[in-house]
Image (tube, rainbow, N blue to C red):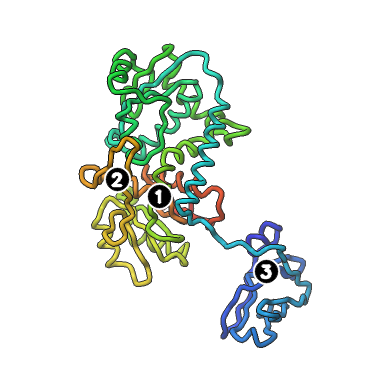
Amino acid sequence: CRAAAKALGFSLAPAPVPRGGGVHLDECYVQRSGGTWMAANGITQSTAAAAGTVEAGHTGLEAQSVRGSTTLKSQSGTVTLCSSQSYPLAFNDYLDPTAVAKRVRKVDWSLADSRSLCPDPKVKCEVLWHLTIKDFFRLGFAHAMSVFEPLRAYVEYNGCKWIVSETLAADWQAWALGPFWSAALPEQRWRARWKAARMCHFKFVGTNVKCKGPSGLLTHAGWHRFVSGRAFNGPGPPTGVFRAAYDLGLQTFGTRLSQYRTPYQGRFAAIHVTDDDNMPAFRLVDIVRSWWPSLDKIFVATSNRAVISDLRSSIGTGIELAWTRNPKERVHQRTKAPSGIHRTDNADDTVADLLDDIAGLASASVVVGTTKSPVFSLARALNLHLHRTVARSNPWCYDVRFMRICG
């Protein structure tokens, strides 16, 4: 009701709530007072409403119960806002695996449209990629990924292909991450191709990458210009090319998000606890409870397990916590690549936990963290694009770096 009234240009004002009796939001209406339209917050209705007529506070409305519904008598210039259909639920920002998969499919179609708008390649060009997920982790996973997605767009916009080995492709998909390559070669052919190629005229987070094609086609300066230009930062198809890194990022994490088992079967908040913000975890919980008091289920993303113990001892009752690798609420789901490579729960735990923390933050209805952290920034971008087409809380994000809401 409030959103509808605001969209119609009315200023908002709460309806007075009388003492005693229950309060029931039963109708949507606006009231004219002193030449100003106001959207009232609802109709106060006592628990005895079914027995007859009740007053709606001092709003100048009279609510009449008729066969379990409420009709209104307009008084003092009051107008009722009506709908030919049922009012939708306030929020539908909890996405189950089916909804996530549907959203990811739409992003895949959008990316296909983006690629169709790239200029036709005039020369043959290849980027031979050798960095695995563990290499990304060594370089700083979230930061490396934030650099990788714009590089993908730059390479593809220039008509170049991504070439990887079958071993790297299998390892990448074993982490349930979406493929980015144009071709995957058997190991022996890959090594021969790599040996014959030259170094690219750009580095990836300080690491050399090899290219095949005209010298100077792909350069660091060209990459920088592209990322700053309209082809990358446009609105996406049909009037632009790429939606910055949003589609690419969600395509990369789409499979994992589709397979991820959320800690709760419904709306939940998520906080990211890191040393980057120097803020104790209980303060992040306080922010959640202050901005979104109805959300009492909170996922905690952290690499420090001591945070969980401290948090459980410092918060009050009525708040339910979950975290990655919680023995009681295990949210990590082991994945298996088409090649048969299966991730273990031993040496790969650190990488798997980070990926699941990102998935938990991306899946939440609301998030709290600091944009000083590359992990939170990556998860926030995924969350934004994943929930792009659903009705959600506004605000849905709080940045403790600047102590303000974020979008």
Res. 86 visible in picture: yes
Name the residue rendered at 57%, 35% in the picture: 236
Q: Quadrant of residue 372?
A: top left
Q: Amino acid under label 2?
A: Ala
Cβ atoms at labels 1 and 2 below 8 Å apart: no
Q: Amino acid under label 3?
A: Cys
Which of the two discs, 1 and 2, labels the residue nearer the N terminus? 2
- Percent coordinates x, y for residue 46 in the rendering: 61, 83
Q: CA distance from mark 1 to mark 2?
A: 27 Å
Disc number placed over residue 215 in the picture, else none: none
Task: Answer few, some or many: residues within 10 Å of disc 3's Cα (few below 14, many 20 plus, some between 14 and 19).
Answer: many
Q: Amino acid under label 1?
A: Arg
The count of marks equals 3
- The residue pinned by badge 3 equals 28
Q: Nearer the viewer, mark 1 or mark 2?
A: 2
Position of 27 with respect to 295 (left or right) is: right
- Percent coordinates x, y for residue 95 in the rendering: 48, 54
Comparing 320 with 88, the one in front is 88
Res. 403 visible in picture: no
- The residue pinned by badge 1 equals 401
The answer to whether residue 61 is above or below residue 133 is: below
- Percent coordinates x, y for residue 187 in the rendering: 28, 23
Name the residue rendered at 27%, 58% in the picture: 307
Task: Answer few, some or many: residues within 10 Å of disc 1's Cα (few below 14, many 20 plus, some between 14 and 19).
Answer: some
The answer to whether residue 364 is above or below residue 113 is: below
> Does dot 3 land on a helix, a strand or a loop?
loop
- Which of the image's four quarters has the N terminus? bottom right
Which of the two discs, 2 and 3, labels the residue nearer the N terminus? 3
- The residue pinned by badge 2 equals 352
Name the residue rendered at 37%, 25% in the picture: 184
- Percent coordinates x, y for residue 186 in the rendering: 31, 23
